[in-house]
Amino acid sequence: MSMRFHWAAIAALVALLLVAGTVTADDDDDDDDGILGDTGKGLGTAAAWGLAFSTTIIIWKPGLKYIRANADKIVEDGLWLKKELGKANRWYLKIHYWVGASAVLVGFIHGVSMNKWEVLFWGGWVGMLFMSVTGSLLLWKWPPRKVKKGARLLHAQRAVLVITIVLLFVSHEFFD
Ligand code: HEM
């Protein structure tokens, strides 16, 4: 197993834990419900699902690459499959951008409505914001080229993503 895949598997696992943790937190009626009550909590769940979806790109990309490389072995008309994969990828990426950016906004409203200001919660949110800002720079091929190259390095590396997910998981599980 390559080091990259190793990180990907850990991140995907923690993302699932995060979603599970947030969903169970929803069931706890004794909690302080914050300004928006259950709606505020629901927004948190939505943001967690959004982050989890955006994170699936670390499985999607190598998966797509593998199928593309073996298209001729999988179906008779390999060219057709490659075209379809290209179409699916364009859709997937659009959802990746919009869901990722929405998760940051929805997560912000959730955080404010919960009226919790501990640094662990907001550290996680800053990590999500970082992913969206670097993702946007990458998407819009922001000149100069150096910035775009840097944005790709920053957006595609796994450390910030893993730290973000760990911060969100730990804060919601243990400090809620
Ligand atoms: C906040 C949640 C987000 C997470 C967790 C996330 C995560 C990632 C990761 C890990 C990759 C690298 C995949 C790889 O090369 O192995 C990636 C690629 C990318 N992301 Fe995001 N991202 C998020 C939001 C965004 C947003 C909001 C945008 C743009 C507005 C964006 C734009 C891109 C682009 C353009 C790529 C390159 C796709 C490609 O190589 O074909 N991302 N993202």
Image (cartoon, rainbow, N blue to C red):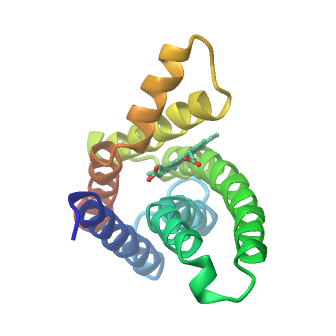
Question: Compared to 29, does 56 lie above or below?
Answer: above
Q: Name the one closer to the observer, 75 or 137.
A: 75
Instruction: Judge from the rendering whether residue 145 lies leftward or rightward of residue 82; answer left or right.
Output: left
Which image quarter is the C terminus in? bottom left
**Location of residue 138 in the rendering, given as x and y in whole percent from the top left corner:** 57, 32
**Location of residue 115 in the rendering, given as x and y in whole percent from the top left corner:** 45, 46
Instruction: Judge from the rendering whether residue 151 lies leftward or rightward of residue 39; answer left or right.
Output: left
Q: Residue at x 54, y 50 (%)?
A: 107
Q: Residue at x 64, y 25 (%)?
A: 141
Q: Name the one closer to the observer, 66 or 122.
A: 66
Question: Compared to 164, does 81 lie above or below?
Answer: below
* Image mark count: 0
Q: Residue at x 55, y 44 (%)?
A: 108
Of all residues, the one furthest to the top in this rendering is: 144
Query: Is residue 176 visible from the viewing direction of this image?
Result: no
Question: Compared to 78, does 135 lie above or below?
Answer: above
Instruction: Judge from the rendering whether residue 94 lies leftward or rightward of residue 175; answer left or right.
Output: right
**Location of residue 148 in the rendering, given as x and y in whole percent from the top left corner:** 53, 23
Which image quarter is the N terminus in? bottom left
Query: Is residue 136 visible from the viewing direction of this image?
Result: yes
Q: Residue at x 67, y 54 (%)?
A: 93
**Location of residue 73 in the rendering, given as x and y in whole percent from the top left corner:** 57, 86
Instruction: Judge from the rendering whether residue 155 lies leftward or rightward of residue 60; answer left or right.
Output: left
